[in-house]
Amino acid sequence: MAIVYQKSAGLTDKELHYCPGCNHGIIHKLVAEVMDELGILDTTIGVCPVGCSVFAYNYFNCDMQEAAHGRAPAVATGIKRTHPNSPVFTYQGDGDLASIGCAEITHAAMRGEKFTTIFVNNAIYGMTGGQMAPTTLIGQKATTCPLGRTKEQAGMPIRMAEMLSTLDGCVYAERVCVTDIPHLNKAKAAIKKAFQKQLAGEGFTFVEVLSTCPTNWGMTPLKAKEWLTDNMIPYYPLGCIKDIDAPKAEVK
Amino acid sequence: MTAKVTFNSDRCKGCELCVSVCPKHIVAIDQETINRKGYHPAHVVDISQCIACASCAKICPDSIITVEKF
Ligand SMILES: Cc1ncc(C[n+]2csc(CCOP(=O)(O)OP(=O)(O)O)c2C)c(N)n1
Ligand code: SF4
Ligand code: SF4
Ligand code: SF4
């Protein structure tokens, strides 16, 4: 009898509080599997956001630190600079990262801080009940745009991976999703690459994961998966946006 | 192939993501059962057809599926 798949050692035994089918759980386990496979569970320090994943510190089997809303990149900067040998990551939603924390992530990327950001883009504020996010699509309904987002009122949705990739300090930016097994495998490979480039001291690494919020989108998990494929991927194209082989930094 | 798929059914949220990715279409929601969370949990209806690909286990957001093969 051989085990083909079991719950990752990178996750604790805590039950996840996420809604049925929420992709946060899938993204958690990919990060957990990568940390386990790279053998860095004992040394990694993760930083949690405010948002539905605020309790992620209960789920990842590594050291975790909670940050104020949007400020995870600032906290991660401090941690990485004082512990340059520790792998460090932030895990942030789109309200957290692209709205209130847009300055922190931008400046961390500009400075080329040597940590990895896992950006969970579900095009809405999940935790607070479904308000419009900077990533909400044109025409998409949210509690603060009940008739659908319009360009005139709120502008066009922000593409964070593309925006951050314009900064020299950002050495890697890729957008992925986890709707099926082939996409999930690509997502895991991207997360692994981001951690590997961080471990090589190359610079700031960023993986944007398109994600579902069945509850606030008002859909079943399967319908949400379809909606993501039909509506999010055309506006947020999947694939590697930036991957430069930055000179390896001396890790002190 | 002899495969074994184990569900930690108490923790299942009946989301059907595992159902949607099984290439053999042998994972289903068990409408006869209600778990302690109040959901109908997923189960395998015909284990003899299972190819132990672990697709169901990999996608489960709650990581409650273990796949083994002999
Ligand atoms: C300083 C501050 N402002 C506002 C809030 C309210 N708030 C909590 S979570 C959140 C947004 C969450 O959305 P997102 O980051 O997309 O994560 P999700 O819940 O969708 O995973 C907001 C605005 C807060 N907690 N603190
Ligand atoms: S509200 Fe949305 S993002 Fe939050 S746990 Fe539920 S489905 Fe996931
Ligand atoms: S291991 Fe593969 S074939 Fe077997 S039940 Fe799971 S998805 Fe279906
Ligand atoms: S994916 Fe997991 S939680 Fe969802 S129905 Fe299947 S076993 Fe249950």
Image (cartoon, rainbow, N blue to C red):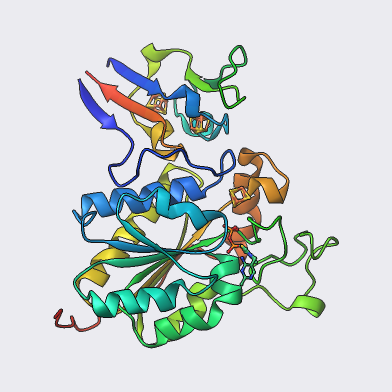
Residue A202 in view (yes/no): no
Quarter of the figure that contains the C terminus of chain B: top left
Picture coordinates of residue B2, whole percent (x, y): 28, 15
Residue A223 in view (yes/no): yes
Q: Is residue B5 above or below residue A252?
A: above
Q: Quadrant holding ligand 3?
A: top left
Total labels drawn: 0
Q: Nearer the viewer, residue A234 or B7?
A: B7
Residue A248 found in image quarter: bottom left
Q: Residue at x 47, y 23 (%)?
A: B9
Picture coordinates of residue A168, whole percent (x, y): 37, 88
Residue A191 found in image quarter: bottom left
Picture coordinates of residue A80, whole percent (x, y): 29, 75
Picture coordinates of residue A163, whole percent (x, y): 51, 80
Q: Nearer the viewer, residue A182 or A116?
A: A116
Q: Residue at x 43, y 75 (%)?
A: A73
Q: Residue furthest right?
A: A147
Horizontal relation, residue B24 to residue A150: left or right? left
Q: Residue at x 31, y 41 (%)?
A: A8
Quarter of the figure that contains the N terminus of chain B: top left
Q: Is residue A200 above or below residue A33?
A: below
Horizontal relation, residue B3 to residue B56: left or right? left
Q: Is residue A2 above or below residue A238?
A: above
Q: Residue at x 55, y 79 (%)?
A: A102
Q: Is residue A121 above or below residue A59?
A: below
